[in-house]
Image (cartoon, rainbow, N blue to C red):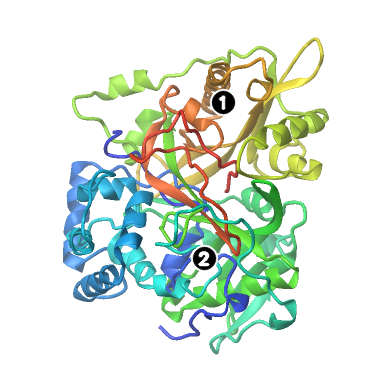
Amino acid sequence: MADESKPSKDAAGKGKAPSDDPETTSTAQVGSDNEEEAEEDIAPDTAPGTTAASKKKKSKRKRVKAALGGGGSSSGSGDATRDDLDKAVSGLNVSQIQEILKMNPALAQQLGVDSSTSLSDAKLQEAMKKLNLEEIMTGLASSGKNVKDMANYKFWQTQPVPKFGESTEPVEEGPFKIVDIEKVPKEPGALLPGFEWVTMDLTKEEEIQELFSLLYGHYVEDDEAMFRFNYSESFLRWALMCPGWTKEWHVGIRASASRKLVAFISAIPVALRVRKKVLSASEVNFMVVHKKLRSKRMAPVLIKEITRRCYLLKTWQAIYTGGVVLPKPVSTCRYFHRSIDWQKLYEVGFSPLPANSKPSYQIRKYALPDHTSTKNLRPMEEEDVDGVLSLLKRYLEKFDMAPVFTREEVVHWLLYKKDTPGDQVVWSYVVEDPSTHALTDFFSFYILESSVINNASHKNVRAAYLFYYATEHGLSPQYTRSDLKTRLNALINDALILAKKYKFDVFNALTLLDNTLFLEDQKFGAGDGQLHYYLYNYNTNPIAGGVDKGNRVDEKGGSGVGVVML
């Protein structure tokens, strides 16, 4: 999952509360007992349409926030929200606040705090309080999505995750605890009267259509309700039915009387390497609760249930991502966006017109050739699977945290078969040496479309997301890092050209893998969102996320993150 992001300004309730027992609390619990907060924490990749609003829209947003005493996502009154914020901030000690600021460079800049600034506990708290309705956490409104997360840091003291304020000395990596499977409940927890657990069968057309409808109507949309993720059935099958998938990890809640699907959470298996240790983990994603039921506190029980089901299959660790800072990210990456059809992005409100610029200049700036330049570049075919697997496995070994792919997973995640029913989801290309027939390079990207709401000219935004890639230029000793940079720039430029060919409007990427070597050269603009990577029940030392202390691209240091999450 990921959080919403847009081009940055600079660049352009009853129910059971979560248990304190880690054996009955989610492997992907993200620190909130509020449905909206938890949904944001286990969200999908960046919504291409989180708006880059004009001054008029910004002014409107401020007026709305003022009228509500906060943000539209807050469930309480403005006064109550401010009180909650004051209490939450007051409860943090100086070490915790300093760590939050370290992980949120944009927030630190907003407070006028940098690495050379030494503030007392009281001054730090006072500076945080002065934000009021501005963002406490990068990319998310403090009044709605983060206040309870901050207040619930106490909850995280009971969980097998690293804590803020702990020693910065290197840790011994490994599980925080060993789960006793005999203590894991064999039956799901009770729901409120009128609701019941179901295991979804996504091989059935009617059930995947139900999930599509639930996600479309009630999942992530931007704060101004201008854009909404539009997951195709093909995308959902691709994302949720990978090799090793099990129906038991596709968990739904239905209304007993109407049989309507009102909530959902999922997990898929992943062999995850964290430095030298390979974990049989789960990747938790796509948690959604019907908007009208968010006061019913269904998110905590959803999270507990997916945890229980993971434990029953002896899956003790999980990886999850989110835009909210919680105890404690393994790594943090930043979103970047590359306009392809700038005019369309401007018309729908995604891309701003920079000061002292003209639309015609922006169109020229982002113009791309019609043809690729890399010799022997072609679409990936079935006979390329073994070559891609070898290249990818060797390339991912460079990174501190990465999946360990099998042949079946390469087929599933990267190979598009023309006879596959439904829409194409992933595009993969390889470069073949004509003399040896060995594959020297490959890259891939996938589609995630967003619907444009209330726009007379455009109905959707087609966003391409950079997926996995690899090149011998990053592996063979005869190549320097400069050679790798040159090669990646050529490959990604071709990826942009192909995305243009297939009518994509924007190309998104994070500061993971070796992306820091080409993002700026290929005219990707920095987004205002960050994606924090978390591990549950596994303690590890920090992993570089491709950004420096100022939240800028760290080309020299690079990234240790090799996991691309949908």
Q: Which mark is residue 495?
A: 1
Q: Nearer the viewer, residue 325 or 36?
A: 325
- Name the element at disc 2: strand
Amino acid of disc 2: Val
Q: Is residue 37 left or right of residue 428?
A: left
The residue at the point 72 percent across, 33 percent down is 394
Question: Residue 361's x, y, as percent?
Answer: 29, 19
Q: Quadrant of residue 357?
A: top left
Q: Residue furthest front?
A: 169
Amino acid of disc 1: Ala
Question: Residue 525's x, y, as percent?
Answer: 38, 32
Alpha-carbon distance for marks 2 and 1? 32 Å
- Would you say residue 161 is visible in this rendering? yes
Question: Residue 261's x, y, as percent?
Answer: 58, 72
The residue at the point 58 percent across, 44 percent down is 564
Classify 275 as above or below 197.
Answer: above
Q: Nearer the viewer, residue 178 or 63?
A: 178
Q: Residue furthest bottom?
A: 193
Q: Is residue 70 left or right of residue 442?
A: left
Circle 2 residue: 288
Disc 1 crowd rating (10 Å Cα; few below 14, some 14-19, many 20+) is many
Classify 316 as above or below 277.
Answer: below
